[in-house]
Image (cartoon, rainbow, N blue to C red):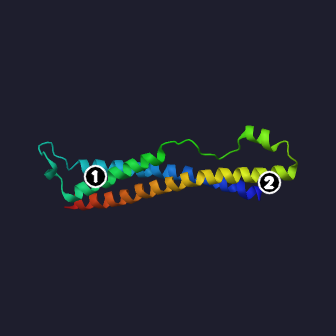
Amino acid sequence: MFQLAKEVLQRQERNVDELRGRAGVVLAGAAIGLGLLGKTFDNTCTGVQCFSLWTWVGIVSLGISLFASLWVLVPRSGWTFGYDIWKLEKDIMPLDLEKARHEMILHIADMSETNEPKLTALTRGFTIASAMLAAGSAAALIDLGR
C-alpha cells in the first residue's frame, strides 16, 4: 500500500513535467503561427479591414494558445511531491513501525489530494492551448491559401 501511494505522487510529478514540456512545444507553435499570420500585415494598410476573417480567427486563436501555454509553464507553489522531513520527524518517527507506515500512507494521500486539483487545472490549460493552436493553424492555412 505504501509503494502504491508513493507511485501516485511520482505519477503526478511526471504528469506535471510532461504537460510543461508539451506546453513549451505548443508555445513555439503558436509563436510560429502568429509570425506567419504577421506576414499579412501591410504597413500601408490601416484599420481592421486590412485583415480577413480567417486572419482574425487565427490571430485570436493563436494568441489564446500562446497565453494558455504560458499559464501552464508558469511555476506555482503548493505542489508536494516529497516528504515534509519536519513533519516526519515530529509526527511519525516516534511511532512504532506499523503505525508509522499507516501515517506515511495518510501523509502521501493528503499530498496527492492537494496536487490533484492543480494538475486538473494544468491539464485544462494545456487542452485549451492545444485546441487553440489547432484552430489557429487551420485558420492560418486557410488564410494563406487564399
Residue holding disc 1: 59
Q: Which mark is residue 102?
A: 2
Q: Are marks 2 and 1 in contact (CB under 8 Å)?
A: no
Indicate the position of residue 10 as horizontal and vertical percent values: 66, 52
The alpha-carbon separation of the residues under discs 2 and 1 comes to 53 Å
Indicate the position of residue 93 as horizontal and vertical percent values: 83, 42
Q: Residue at x 58, y 55 (%)?
A: 116
User: Between disc 2 and disc 1, whose residue precedes?
Assistant: 1
Indicate the position of residue 144 as horizontal and vertical percent values: 23, 58
Helix or strand or loop: what does disc 2 sit on? helix
Q: Is residue 40 visible?
A: yes
Q: Is residue 13 visible?
A: no
Q: Residue at x 33, y 60 (%)?
A: 135
Q: Residue at x 65, y 47 (%)?
A: 81
Using the image as rendered, state which of residue 3 and residue 24 is in the foreground. 3
Q: Amino acid at mark 2?
A: His
Q: Amino acid at mark 1?
A: Ile
Q: Which mark is residue 140?
A: none
Using the image as rendered, state which of residue 136 and residue 109 is in the foreground. 109
Left or right of residue 119, residue 2 in this image: right
Left or right of residue 80, residue 58 in this image: left
Left or right of residue 12, residue 6 in this image: right
Helix or strand or loop: what does disc 1 sit on? helix
Using the image as rendered, state which of residue 114 and residue 56 is in the foreground. 114
Quadrant of res 1? bottom right
Indicate the position of residue 15 as horizontal and vertical percent values: 57, 54
